[in-house]
Image (tube, helix red, strand yellow):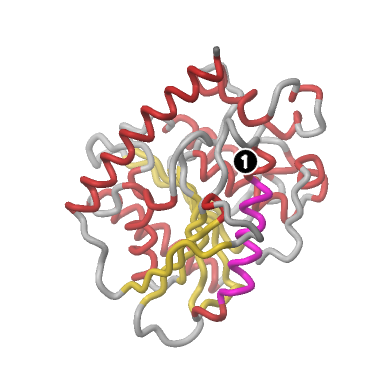
Amino acid sequence: MFDRLIRYGIKNQEEKLERFLARHEKENPFPDGVALTADIAYADDTDPRHTMDIFRPEGASGKLPVMFNIHGGGFLLGKKEVNRLFCADFCRRGFLVFAAEYPLAPDADIFTILRSLAAAMKKAGEIAGTYGGDSEKFFLSGDSAGAWLAVYLAAMQKSAALAGAAGVDLSGTPRVYALGLQSGMFYTRKPDNIGMFVPPLIYGKGYKKRPFAPYTDPEHREIVGNLPPAFLVTGRGDFLRHYSRRYAKVLSAASVPSEFLDMENAGKLAHAFPAILPEFPASKTANDAMASFFFRSIKG
């Protein structure tokens, strides 16, 4: 019964998302100057959830830094096309951009999702040079649940304990220089609407008795202590603003190099506004700041 209700709710949200995308893309055409290569397979199968899009600035010369984007959707819905204009925007800022699709709950647990994205990262690193990218300057960005995934993937690169508990192999993936985290859904086990129903859907039944259980806390030292520099952004109107505020404090207390942009005076903003609505003035401000943070991290 619970599974049927979840799937019914997901279907309704997917229909709303498609209507939004159709309207948004009509009002905001894909920009000139960006070459899009869509649906590149990153796994040895025909699963459409194992594909990614590549955005390259037309006429670019020299090796470009690489940004790998992970869309949000609460682990239950979403698609790479939602962030297409955001990815194109960062492409025009001088990045080679990869946007990965991945399996979703409840059909896939979080470990399957992480393994899929690890494979996508590895593939991106292998082919970046073909598209003019420099895989040694590799950035992860994600909005909402995508931010959670970015945090854990980056931490797993340095923490064998964390990667082992999840059963995820990050060998061969490009080292993550820095993170861009937009309206992050950092917490999955708080006593709120997310914590009430999401954990068993993504971690599996009986997850509290499994090796990964301690790491469902994103403040665990194996996670926070192994993160690269991070840029976080939220604003008034974001229903997960308190998550970003909390996690920014956690990173600061752990001496993780970070920058936190909390947009109080830009009006009421949507959740994940910089990724979903990059044409908005507040989004442009946020994305300017994130791009600047990335470029500064390259210079050291």
The amino acid type found where label 1 is placed reads Ala
Q: Is residue 145 above or below residue 227?
A: above
The residue at which mark 1 appears reads as 253
Q: Is residue 164 above or below residue 179?
A: above
Residue extending furthest toward the top: 1
Q: Which residues are magenta?
A: 114-128
Residue at the image position 51 percent from the left and 65 percent from the top: 40
Residue extending furthest toward the bottom: 61
Q: Which quadrant is the C terminus positioned in?
A: bottom right
Q: Nearer the viewer, residue 86 or 47?
A: 47
Measured as percent of width and height from the top left, residue 189 is found at 61, 24
228 lies left or right of 166: left
182 lies left or right of 108: left
Measured as percent of width and height from the top left, residue 53 is found at 46, 62
**Tag 1 secondary structure:** helix
Tally of numbered discs = 1
Residue at the image position 42 percent from the left and 23 percent from the top: 9
Q: Quadrant of residue 1?
A: top right
Q: Nearer the viewer, residue 158 or 76?
A: 76
Q: Is residue 291 above or below residue 250?
A: below
Residue extending furthest toward the front: 46
